[in-house]
Image (spheres, grey):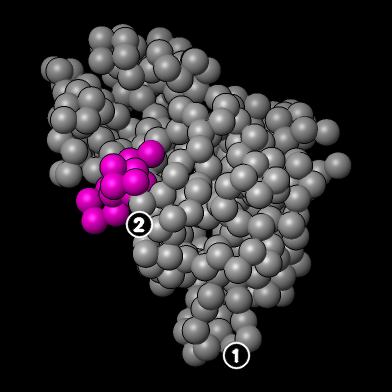
Amino acid sequence: MTLRQSAAGALAASMMLGVGAAWAQTCTPETYTVQPGDTVFTIAAGKYGDPEKWTLIYYANEAALQASVFQVTPGDSLRLPCAPGTEVVEDATPLRQDDAELKLLTGGNFAPFTDPDWPGQGMITEIVNAAMEATPAPVTYSITWEDDWSQHLFPALAGKQFDMGFPWYKPDCAATPDNERCVNFHFSEPLAEILVLLFVRAGSGIDYQSDADMVGHTLCRPKGYFTHDLDRPGREWLSSGAIKLIQPDTPEACFTLLQDGQVDAVTVNVFLGAQTIEEMGLRGQVVPLDKPLSVEGLHVVISKTHWRGTTFLYRFNAGLAALKDSDRYGQIVSRHLGVFWDEIKSP
């Protein structure tokens, strides 16, 4: 069974109890003091019975774990969120209507973030729904799904066929103000931040503690994926020729090149990497390095020529801030991360 098929089954079950269903939290998050020898994997195994669910711990402790994702320091305190439950309760979205004041655009094939076949239509979709409810003077909104992402920014959003789009990565606009996304669009505060990791062959001896460690290596990232993090100010790996970048058509092709020894590391986001490793049967053969290559935010975008763009942006950011200050944000994130790790290992 594929990730999409099993997720669709979970969604179908939840739809029997109500549109926009969500799993209820039935426990109280706890604080854990890190012990000698602990890693996020061992802590996740003890708390959730599954070391692969380490991302639940990471996203509840981002500030503390961002520098070195997997390693933790004895004596530190970590917040351990509830394990995603199985009870389903209705989580209505009364502001979401077909004929609405505000028109939003997104696309599928981006699980666990946005996909109509994923429970709740994805983690980011649920965050957007909840943030829209929390905005000052909430308005009705619709969400349109277009799986051809190349049509979203230009012409659909730039041409104001839709008011807002999500989720989009934001380039470093301070360093590259001429980037077409920076020139044409406002970006919301991050809906969530995604780790981009380096995946290497187990036992390869490759280490990444500083950018100098990657000089001379060959990296792989699929064609069409962003590369701004590889050439940001102070790094300039591509423009200086410090690394060689290979860009085949698919993530699977990157991991095949890695196994064949033709590249030294694959660099993709943590979820895509984990999903591809599982689907290709490479668990234990390919491992992520501790230090993230970058941390990339996913954002709502609004055309700078939209006559109400700054108003929409202010209101959405206010709703997102209110959501992040509540327990609901953490519950949404934990629930989807739990589903993701369960689904990629489904037979």
Q: Is residue 268 left or right of residue 7?
A: left
Quarter of the figure with the C terminus: top right
Q: Is 231 in the magenta? A: yes
Given residues 83 and 239, the one toward you in this image is 239
Mark 2 lies on residue = 325
- 280 is higher (above) or lower (below) than 42: above
Disc 2 residue type (three-letter): Asp
- Residue drawn at point x = 64 percent, y = 64 percent: 204
Given residues 230 and 270, the one toward you in this image is 230
Residue 289: % across, % down: 55, 63
Residue 126: % across, % down: 49, 37
- Residue drawn at point x = 77 percent, y = 33 percent: 2
Q: Is residue 182 left or right of residue 18?
A: left
Given residues 259 and 34, the one toward you in this image is 259
Which numbered disc covers residue 36? 1
* Region in magenta: 227-241
